[in-house]
Every structure is written in structure tokens, then in C-alpha cells.
Image: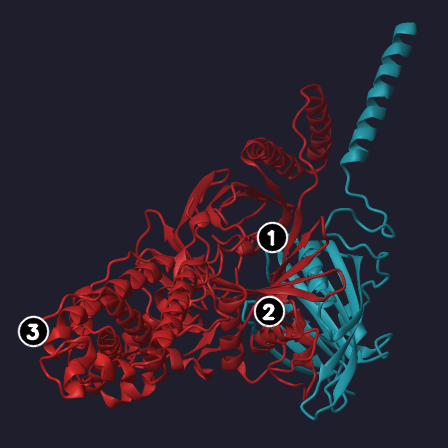
Chain colours: A red, B cyan
Amino acid sequence: MLERVRLRPALLGAAVTTVGYFVATASLVPVSAGLLVDAGPAVAVAVVIGVTALAALIGGYVTVRALRRHGGYPQRLSALPTLVVMGVAASLVVIVMAAALMAAAGEPAVLAGAPAIVVTLTLAALPAVLLVRPAAEADGYVGRTTRARRLPALREDAGQGSLETVGVTTVAAILVAALIIAMVPGGTWLGDNVRTQLCRIATLGQGDCGAPTGYEAQLRPEPEHACTLSDTSDNRGMAVSVMWFTAENGALIRVEKLSDDTYRVSREASLGAGGQVDTGAGVTVTVDGDTYGGEVQASASALLNLGAGATWVVDEAEKDKLVDYLKSERNWESVQTTLAAAGPAGSFASALATGGRAAWNWLTDAYTPSMPDEYYGYAGIDGNAGAAATGLVQHAEAGVSTSSVLGSRLDTKNKRLTVYYEGQIDASAGYQSHLEGSEVGASGTVRPLVAVTYDTDGNPLSVQVQAMAAGEAKLTVGNMFGEPYLDENPNGGFIFDARVSITSDETRDIAMGLLKASGIATPHPVARYEGAASAVDTFVSAAKERGTLTRQTVNMEGQTDFGINANAKVAGVGLGASFENSTETINTSDADYWDGSRWRPWSSCLG
Amino acid sequence: MTAERHRFRRAAGLAALVVLLASCATDSVDPATPPAGPHAPTAPASRLTPQDATGETIDLEGAGSIVAPSGATVEGPSTTPNGSQQLNIRMPDADDSGLPAVQVTWGADTAGVYEQSWTAENAAKVDGTISDYVRAAAQWPGSAESVVATWTEEIALTTDGSLDVSATRLTVQDDDGTTVIVLALTPEGEMADSDAERVLRSLTLG
């Protein structure tokens, strides 16, 4: 005989089922993930369904016990309506909480597993009637329902009222806490682990499920540093090359639009004559058989393509004035260069024209830029000088100075100095862990751009590692940053950028370990260094947990036959005409940052 | 007569103006004064000057030449990772560490001498093994800008010890943009009048 639905027992059981469900899926399953993967798919599926059903069964048991206490359990069948309500209620709570967790993680709250949850939590609760004897059956008065005949059963349940109150209060507190955890920033931990571990089980450990996150790897905010949105260089020179390269007597103005609506305008101070810039950062881009520097789009490496000069950080309005001013100066210097080539008469004419130029500026009250924000310099062939002394001394320790200095940049306001190195990391030394299951293994040498910023006393403040994953270097570089399975991009690639601020002895050791692994001399002893692979993994992990890790998609307009040669030299692409302007633009798109558990759109970097 | 005097005065005035303007257009620089500019060396100008030497003249494949003492061992040239050429010269009296020694590097470069030596100085400042780094402008025939840098460096050895060395580096650049860098290395305090310094001073561009 079916009894009416008793809500209080049903809700109590639903609460217990809900808690049990999340405990099982968020704790027991993750803890035993390794065992489940090893056991195979059938066992894993059985365990997942089993622990979920067990949660519902326990909830059902609690419901039936409460039902009997309230006199609503004369026969086993009489509890079924309440158990069904309990199962459905538990399912609804689970589904709502799961949706909240997904929303907190920034994912669409579409729960494909909702029907399975309803079915499992409802049906699995029903066998609970087999675990609890009906009151009448327990008292030997089957079919009788008088108050006197229920007394023995009531005595058996004596004291459970207060327990239920405590239980309901506790469960409610847990639910509220769970909801708060799910909704507040950083609440992705629960959802992450559920998703990650279930993904691992479903894919038998072969899928790209990400790593379980710890409490220390909570949701991270967007990076504060500005990113480069586009990079346009206006180049004029004699026997000019394309934009970021320079040629005889040429000059270059570089305009970088940053994501914070500021512009970096750079102007060459002087150029050595002849030759082509070897950007040297290890990643170059080949287009139609010609090789470009692949890192040219990144603001941090902007200096690599220039000889030396000054950079102003300005807003849009001043940018236009500044660029006009610099172009005018550039044209003027072109004239001067031409005049200087004419011998003494040219020098005379140049002197005359200089006076006229100054007078014109004075009369027209021409715009005059403020002091540059930064000075930068490219190391040229002197970049290997740091390793020269070591190379000359016999019995010198090898591997200490295998890097090259690419350039440096001095902040004129706070006097902080950033030195850019071309690191050299043996990729075959130990990145295989990211490539299990891949048919292609990592090999060769990764030459990332490493930027170290120092204070005025020479103490390192931050370390930045940047490399481009594209073409032949896609797998190796992607693997270095823990992303070996990148999408194909025939017209570009991905710029990875990992940064760690040095705020403690630990982060200093991590950063110094990375420098040592890259062949860069460090100003401090490295206590934690345990080898190149370990140092790089530790650094990237630190960037994920407490620094910043970003990636940007790089596209070059109108160019095909894209290829990357990780160690190729830069060859120029001459346009073959004197005094010919050239402008090219490299665009970036799809910028992401690592939020502590996954890639998120870097909204401030999307223009 | 008065008109002739006036014409003469105008001509003299014009000539004076021409001389004045022409003098403004020349590149004459006081050797003792550090050059201007954000990347220029700030130390007092170096007194290191070219000096003829006797021995074996080594051709730098169009970049110039340098003279090694008789009995010296020349290693190279070889190509560096950035494409420049490089050779090492070991002195006849080199010790177990291979010093005194000279390294010559040359190749095309788009960075000016002041600019690239500015970056080299910046890198040296934050290198814990380098001390007493001084970068100074110098005068060298054939090079519009020349820089001499000196420092002391602690070299880690495979034998768990270290070796302190004195270093002098000359950076010059010819009109074609070819940069030549000569690094002389001796045990600490033995640079002055050493064979390594004599080799460095024997560099001739062109």
C-alpha cells in the first residue's frame, strides 16, 4: 500500500544524497583515479556508478528511517513515493549545483548528464526499503496502524529526532558552504577536479584533461601587463628591407598599439651600415622562402629588430604627433645622410640646412617630444661576448654561458634594467612527460627569449620566458609550456609568454634555476637547480600558479607558405629600391591567459 | 675705393660665416671628452691606441688584420651561432689555463658600436662573475666609433675552483658596417704590456 509523500524525510534523504554524491565524485573518485585508470574502463564506469548509487542508497536509507519514525512506513511499498521524491529532489539539487559550478568556471551551464543523474539517484534510493524493516513488521503487528501498536517502533527511533535536526542543520550548512565555494572567485577547484578526474577516467588517462588543481592554484585574474595588438613599422631607408629590418643609412619607426590603449613609439638612434639583423631569439618565420624574425610582434622583443634607440609610451593623440615628428626628423636625417655623402660641400650644405630646420621648428612652434620612457640597445655580434671569456679559458666549466645577450632596455624613470637573452635549453633532456602517447618526441634545442628585469642594485625582479610555437618548432615549444597538442595554424603560430616575479627566496631560486637551465649566468647561487627539464617545468608551473602565462595567436596577412625554423638565421627581404617606404602589419588574435586551471580569453588583449 | 672696401667686407663676412658653418658641420671630437648620447660611454676616454707589432699577420677576411707573436697558436676561424667569424690566438707562453689569449670576432652588424657596447655593459653589470667593468670611448683608425671595455671576471673551472682573469675588449666598426671585436684575456693583473694587449693593439681595419 502506498502512503502519501512525507516531505521532511524526503528532503533529509535528498540532502544526504547530495552531499554523498559530491563527496564521492569530488573526493573518492579523484583520489582513486590512478587505480581506476589502471583497472580499465569497465571497472571505472562501475565504480563511478556504484559510488553514486551508494550515495543515493544511503540517502534512501536515511529517508526510510525518518519515515518510519514519523509513522509513514507501515509497509515497504509505502515508502516508495517518498523515496522517488527524495531521488528527484536530490537530482535537482545536484544538477543546480553542478550548473553553478560550471558557471563559476566560466563554462556554459549545459549538463548533458542530467537524465543519468535523475535516473541513478532515484532508482538507487529505492532498494533502501530492503534495508529497513517496516514498523509493523518489526513489531509483529503487520497491517495494524493504531498508535498503541506503533509504540515499540517509536521507542526504537527514540532520540533520532534530535539527530535529524543536527543532521539537517549540518547538511544545510554544507550545502550553503558548497554553493558559496562554487560561486565565489576561485571556486573552480571543485568543478575542476570533478571534470578533470571524470575526463581522465573516460579517456583512460589519454585525453587532454588538464591537471587537478590544488587550493594554491585558484582562479587567477587577467594579466596586468599590456599586450601588443598590432605592430606596424614604417621603414624608410636606402636599399631598404622590410619593416623590422634595417639597411644602409636607414631608419625605423616602430609603432606598437598596446591593449591598454597606449602606444609604444620607437625610433632608431643610429644604425650600423649594412648587414641584416639576426634577431637571434631562436624562432624565425619563413614566408615564401624568406625568413623573418618570428618574435617581432611581441612588445618585449621589439628591440630585437632594431639597432638601438628610444621608446616613448604615449596615448593615441600624442602618438600621431610623435610619429609625425619622428617621420619629419627621419626625412631630415635622410637628407643629411645624402648631403654628408657629398664631401665637404655636403657638410657645408648640411650645416646650412640644419640652421634652417631649427629656425623652421622655432617659427612654427613644432611639437617637441618629452624625454623617452626607455632606451634600448641591440647587442649585435657582441652578444656572445659574455661567453667569450669562458670559451677562452681551458678547463672552464661548460654550459654556464651558452646563452647570448640579445639586447637591453633601460626604464628612464625607475632606472630598472631589462636584459634580453637568447636562452639555450636542451629540449630532449626531459619534456617527454608531456608527450606520452604522441608519435613525435621532443628533440633538439629550444632557444627561448628570456628577459630578466633588475633593480638598480642588480637584483633580479622578474623573469620572463617567451617563445613561438609554430611550424617545425610548434611541438617542441608547445611541449615546453605544457601544450604539445596545439591547433594547426598554417599562417602563423602561438606566442607563449611565462612570467614570474621574484618576491621570495623560493621564487628567486625558481627563476635562477630557469636562467641556469638556459645557460644564463646568474647573480645568485641556485639552490634548487636540479637539471634543465626540472627547472623549466618548475618555472612554468610557478608562472601558472603565481605568475602569468599567456599565449597569443600570430597571423601574418596575405602571406602563405609559412614555416618556422627554430635555429635559422634571419635573411633579409630586400625590396630593392632606395628611399622606398614599406609598411607591414602583423596581427595577433585569440589571446588567452592561464587562470590557474585552464586557458581563459584574455579579454583586455583582444582589442 | 669705399665701394671696394664694402665688397671686401661683405666677402670677408661671408667667408667667416662659411668657415663658421663649416666648422659646425665637421665631426671633430675632443678625444678626452666622452661622446654624447644615451648609449655613449660615460667613462673618460680610453688611452689605448693602435700599435705596430711584429710577428705573423692574420687576415680577417676583408675586415682587417691583426698580428700574432711568433710561436702563437691560431685556432679558427670558425662561425659563431649568430653567423660572425671568430678565431682564438694562444700566446707562446700560455699557462695551463690557456692564458694569455686573444679572441677576434668580426661580422656585419646593424647595431652601432656605442649601442651594442651599451648592452654588453648592461649585461655585465648584472653578471655576478664580472666586476670593475669600465666602458670608454677610444680613437681607432677606420672606425667612426670605437669602445674599449675592461673588467675582471671569475671563471668557474671544472676542477671545482675558479680563475680570476683581466679582460680588455676593443669594439670597432668600419664604414661598411663590419664590426670587429678583439678580446684580450690574461690572469688577473697581468694585462698591461702583455702579449695579449699587444695583439689587440695591432688590429688594423680595412
Which chain is home to disc 2? A
Residue A208 shows in the view: no
Is B55 on the left-hand or right-hand side of A12? Answer: right
Judging depth in this view, the residue of A401 and A272 nearest the camera is A401
Marks 2 and 1, how far apart in space?
16 Å
Number of residues whose C-alpha sits closer than 10 Å to that of mark 3, classed few (under 14), some (14–19) or many (20 or more):
few
Judging depth in this view, the residue of A455 and B10 nearest the camera is A455
Instruction: Give the quadrant of residue A52.
Output: bottom left
Q: Give the labeled residue for mark 1.
A: A307
Q: Decide: marks 2, 3 in contact (CB < 8 A)?
A: no
Number of residues whose C-alpha sits closer than 10 Å to that of mark 2, classed few (under 14), some (14–19) or many (20 or more):
many
Q: Residue furthest front?
A: A148
Say above or below: A482 vs B142. below
Q: In the structure shown, which secondary structural element does the residue marked by tag 2 occupy? A: strand
Dividing the image into 4 quarters, which one contains the N terminus of chain A? bottom left
Q: Residue furthest left?
A: A1
The amino acid on which the numbered mark 3 sits, given as a three-letter code, is Met
